[in-house]
Image (cartoon, rainbow, N blue to C red):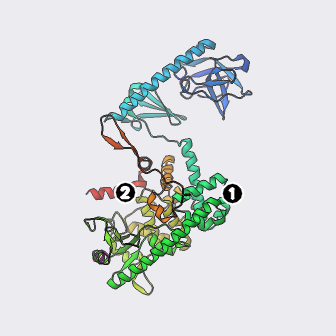
């Protein structure tokens, strides 16, 4: 219960309800600790706030608790200054407050009412979940009084919210009014946000070559946590390459094994690309390597630093079905029984023993109706490989925009890898801003090109930001995006890393089922689904591309 200063102060909050409400004025009288007895209401300072609570015991510890709080407060220090509350004023009427034994009896009665009200409220919230029709709190009239927000239904106050905590003034309204989403981050979310800021700052320092001093200035537990989370992002080769002897000993040996395991996979990957290139040349087919298959060799200091699982290769649309049949004749098999050509932006994935999976693309965008893919085979989108007229390379600007598009389309999930692609692209090439803007218009993407710099400022210092953005990003939307970017990769990436008993455990992938009243078994929403729902609600423009794709797919 927050208050102001003596000799009187205003109440703001719910911790003394139903006795004291927000807006009540309590009168104060300075007292010594030995003059206070259990049952008295006192005002004291804690962490810069003045709190009005009831004394529940004075020995062996001096402890207080709000009438509307289920748990007591931390014991007060011996030198805490106390003010007694003998009375309060509401609507111009002054009412004395009970003290001593009468005050304790009132406290116990209020605690019984609190427990009863909590049970009633749980039942009301259950009804609210089951009812098919309900009101959202955002649809109600609202009035802000500092940190307190009051919700009105037909001009009557029905609920109050302060710092994410709700207090219902009308219990029946809790049966059909859905809570408004929280506006502030919880303590756990704030800790996660601070760690995310450090993690992205470290990634930016790895790209610029200044990661070692930043890593060493962290405490030992933080360094171990950075290593653990880095490996679950598939970044252990990058950690080993940039930090090496600065890593904790147990992680250094594991990351070294990861680096050489990924290097071994890269040998198989590069050999497969060379063999496929010979096959495409023999067939007289033009092709363009995409994504990691190109960036790993073009912009990264070592190809093993870029995690890759499959080979994405772009072909001209008239030739892609022919090359698909040619690959099948050469031992490549599809896992799909029915080949629905051109239903997606790539054909069915092909598999061959000893080779990474191959995805033949005929378009680079999942929203394939945006532009004609034939424009990708000429400048400014691609240029021919010197000495090899059939092999072409996307221009750095096209790679930049394609990487940004994939981040938006994937709704920022697993965005660490894409952010590193952008950072290394910017470091390797002097990118043409005007060309990127032009391609953004021609491809009909209309992306906010500066949004990633707004969302991840720690990774991109001011001088490295190519574009600006004036988007208003809610705090919880920013948290959801950064949390999605740091989601742990599924266990499918582990074959590309060392199989070691020292590896950090992957996150639990299977979710239990639950039974809802009047409904069948259904899957519990995963953390990813909750974060996506939060992002769609708080910042819909960050998920617009995915929604447009779904609308096109349904048509």
Q: Is disc 2 surrounded by few (<14), some (14 to 19) or many (20+) residues within 10 Å? A: some
Q: Secondary structure at mark 1?
A: loop
Whether residue 348 is visible, yes or no, is: yes
Residue 277, by quadrant, is: bottom left
Q: Nearer the viewer, mark 2 or mark 1?
A: 1
What label sits on residue 217 in the rendered view?
1
Task: Name the residue located 41 percent from the left edge and 66 percent from the top edge.
Answer: 440
Which residue is at the front of the view, 121 or 494? 494
Q: Is residue 15 one of those drawn in magenta?
A: no
Question: Which callout, 2 or 1, points at the residue further toward the start of the chain?
Answer: 1
What label sits on residue 546 in the rendered view?
2
Task: Name the residue located 56 percent from the left edge and 24 percent from the top edge.
Answer: 16
Magenta-drawn segment:
316-323
Q: Is disc 1 surrounded by few (<14), some (14 to 19) or many (20+) residues within 10 Å? A: few
What label sits on residue 463 in the rendered view?
none
Question: Horizontal and vertical percent for residue 219?
Answer: 67, 53
Residue, far bottom: 387
Q: Is residue 97 left or right of residue 381?
A: right
Magenta: main secondary structure? helix
Question: Horizontal and vertical percent for residue 305?
Answer: 53, 68
Question: Horizontal and vertical percent for residue 511?
Answer: 41, 46
């Amino acid at each position: 219960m927050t208050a102001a200063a003596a000799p009187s102060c205003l109440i703001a909050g719910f911790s003394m309800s139903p006795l004291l409400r927000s807006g009540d004025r309590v009168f104060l009288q300075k007292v010594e600790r030995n003059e206070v007895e259990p049952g008295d209401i006192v005002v004291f300072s804690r962490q810069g706030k003045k709190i009005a609570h009831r004394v529940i015991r004075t020995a062996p510890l001096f402890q207080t608790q709000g009438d509307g709080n289920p748990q007591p407060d931390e014991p007060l220090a011996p030198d805490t200054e106390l003010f007694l509350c003998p009375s309060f004023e509401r609507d111009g009427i002054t009412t004395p407050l009970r003290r001593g034994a009468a005050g304790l009896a009132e406290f116990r009665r209020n605690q019984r009412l609190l427990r009863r009200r909590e049970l009633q409220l749980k039942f009301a919230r259950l009804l609210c979940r089951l009812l098919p029709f309900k009101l959202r709190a955002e649809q109600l009239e609202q009035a802000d009084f500092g940190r307190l927000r009051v919700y009105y239904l037909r001009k009557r106050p029905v609920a109050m919210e302060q710092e994410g905590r709700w207090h219902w003034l009308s219990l029946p309204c809790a049966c059909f009014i859905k809570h408004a989403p929280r506006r502030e981050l919880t303590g756990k979310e704030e800790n996660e946000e601070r760690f995310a800021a450090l993690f992205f700052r470290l990634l930016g320092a790895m790209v610029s070559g200044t990661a070692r001093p930043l890593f060493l200035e962290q405490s030992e537990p933080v360094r171990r946590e950075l290593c653990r989370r880095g490996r679950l992002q598939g970044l252990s080769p990058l950690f080993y390459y940039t930090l090496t002897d600065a890593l904790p000993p147990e992680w250094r040996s594991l990351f070294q094994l990861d680096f050489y395991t990924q290097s071994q996979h890269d040998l198989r990957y590069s050999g497969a690309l060379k063999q496929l290139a010979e096959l495409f040349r023999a067939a007289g087919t033009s092709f363009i390597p995409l994504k990691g298959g190109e960036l790993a060799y073009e912009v990264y200091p070592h190809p093993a630093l870029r995690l890759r699982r499959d080979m994405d290769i772009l072909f001209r649309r008239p030739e892609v079905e022919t090359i698909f049949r040619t690959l099948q004749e050469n031992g490549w098999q599809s896992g799909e029984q029915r080949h629905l050509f051109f239903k997606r932006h790539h054909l069915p994935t092909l598999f061959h023993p000893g080779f990474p999976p191959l995805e033949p693309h005929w378009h680079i965008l999942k929203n394939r109706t945006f532009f004609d893919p034939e424009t990708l085979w000429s400048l400014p989108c691609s240029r021919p490989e010197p000495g090899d007229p059939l092999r072409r390379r996307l221009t750095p600007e096209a790679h930049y925009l394609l990487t940004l598009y994939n981040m938006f389309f994937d709704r920022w999930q697993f965005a660490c890898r894409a952010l590193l692609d952008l950072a290394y692209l910017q470091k390797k090439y002097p990118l043409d801003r005007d060309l990127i803007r032009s391609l953004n218009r021609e491809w009909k993407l209309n992306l906010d090109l500066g949004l990633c710099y707004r969302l991840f400022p720690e990774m991109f210092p001011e001088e490295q930001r190519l574009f600006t953005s004036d988007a208003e990003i809610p705090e919880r939307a920013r948290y959801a995006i950064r949390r999605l970017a740091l989601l742990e990769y599924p266990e499918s990436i582990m074959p590309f890393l060392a199989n070691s008993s020292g590896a950090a455990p992957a996150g639990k992938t299977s979710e239990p089922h639950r039974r809802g009243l009047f409904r069948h078994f259904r899957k519990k929403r995963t953390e990813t689904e909750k974060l996506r729902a939060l992002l769609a609600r708080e910042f819909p423009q960050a998920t617009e591309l995915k929604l447009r794709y779904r609308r096109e797919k349904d048509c």
